[in-house]
Amino acid sequence: MSDAATSENDSYWIPRRVALVVGGLLVVYLTVNPTVFAMLTVGVALSGVLTRYRAHYAPIRQPLDIEAKVPTTAPVTSYLDVLLRVRRAEGYRGLLRGAVPTTFVTLVWRILPYFLPWHEVQHLFWHALPDGELGTLCAQLTWLAISIPLLVIVNREVTGPYLLNWKAPRTAFASLFSQSERSRPWTLLWTASPLVVAEIIRLSFVHASDSACLFVEQYANEYMRGDPVLKEHLERGLERGPLTLPLALIIAQSMAVVAVIKGLTAILVCPLEVAVVRLSCQRPGSVSEVDPEEQAHKEAISEGTPEPVIRVRDTSYNGLWDCLSTVRREEGWSALYRAFWVTLLFMHGPVFDAFSIRW
């Protein structure tokens, strides 16, 4: 064996040994924690498919000057279509894109309490926040500042043209970030600023919706407490009374109002979620830009699939409003409401509060 090969093997010996130790600890941890295992497998796969579906660029009219330059991609029709296409083109490894950075952050988040006075930190943090919905919003904004870098890394890996190799983190890092971003890291703040604005607007809509739903629930409860039959049962010390026709009507009306509020909120939030995906996937420079030094290690990046799963827009969006208006102009309103059912289904806050009104 030559000296160069020996030196290369020696340089990879420590990272591989560390990776084996971390991998063993991860297997043990996931074995005793099925919830985290499900999140890092099924959750990552479904989230990655959703990201690809919303990031897919499908202009209504294709300019003639670039028609021959874009890769041939079959039309994307639905979320399930993207799921089957990823499974067919890239296999299970393609479905698990983004699992490595998500797993790393999850492990760090779980290990930190063993080395830091975690309870004291949480106590100081929560007591520093205001009460009510404003405090919850501040907590979510704090978590947003921490999670946006992970969001950018995961979404770029999911929508990138290559299957990254975790054994070569340096080359993988070079494929995720452009040369300008690696040489001037502060430019990432400009990349993340539209994401922060979009998330703040989205969280504001969600919390306004939650407050409206809580108001509906409180109004319905006050109205039902005035019912003579229910009032008599409450005076006897009973927790529940008979379900009379007036009570059934107020419950049905509350359910309908909550459904309308959540539906309107989802209509406002879904375009913002699509914009967050588009903005987090874009970066200055070519998608396949890799330094010459990194290009020498071709084994670090797997070859791209013969048929691209999705197509990503080559030109970057200039901010949140430009992203929303450009998507609507080039791809139509339907592109802003891709996977609308996901937004409606996983709305945060008391979605079904009106269903739990006590009578």
Image (cartoon, grey):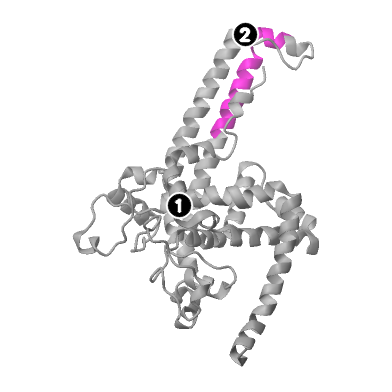
Mark 1, other Cα within 10 Å: few <14 / some 14–19 / many ≥20: few
The quadrant in which the C terminus is found is top right
Q: Secondary structure at mark 2?
A: loop
Query: As rendered, which of 214 and 285 lies closer to the eye?
Result: 285
Q: Residue at x 48, y 62 (%)?
A: 156
- Amino acid type at circle 2 is Thr
Amino acid type of the residue that numbered disc 1 sits on in the rendered structure: Arg
Residue 152 in the image, given as x and y percentages of width and height: 51, 61
Is residue 70 shown above or below 286?
Answer: above
Range shown magenta:
212-232
Q: Residue at x 41, y 70 (%)?
A: 288
Rendering coords of residue 87 (x, y %): 48, 51
Neighbourhood count class around disc 2 (C-alpha, 10 Å): few under 14, some 14–19, many 20 upward: few
Residue identified by numbered label 2: 244
Tag 2 near tag 1, CB within 8 Å: no
User: How far apart are the two marked residues, 2 and 1, measured between alpha carbons?
Assistant: 55 Å
State the residue lying farthest toward the front.
1
Would you say the magenta stretch is mainly helix, strand or loop? helix
Residue farthest to the left, as pictured: 64
Q: At x 57% / y 52%, what residue is drawn?
A: 44
Name the N-terminal-most of marks 2 and 1: 1
Query: Which image quadrant is residue 236 in?
Result: top right
Horizontal side, residue 11 vs residue 303: left or right: right
Which dot marks residue 138?
A: none
Inspect the magenta stretch and tell me whether residue 350 lies in it. no
Q: Secondary structure at mark 1?
A: helix
Give the answer, above or below, for where 239 lies relative to 354: above
Task: Say which mark, if any, is on residue 88.
Answer: 1
The residue at 52%/19% (across/down) is 253
Residue 158 picture location, percent across and down: 49, 58
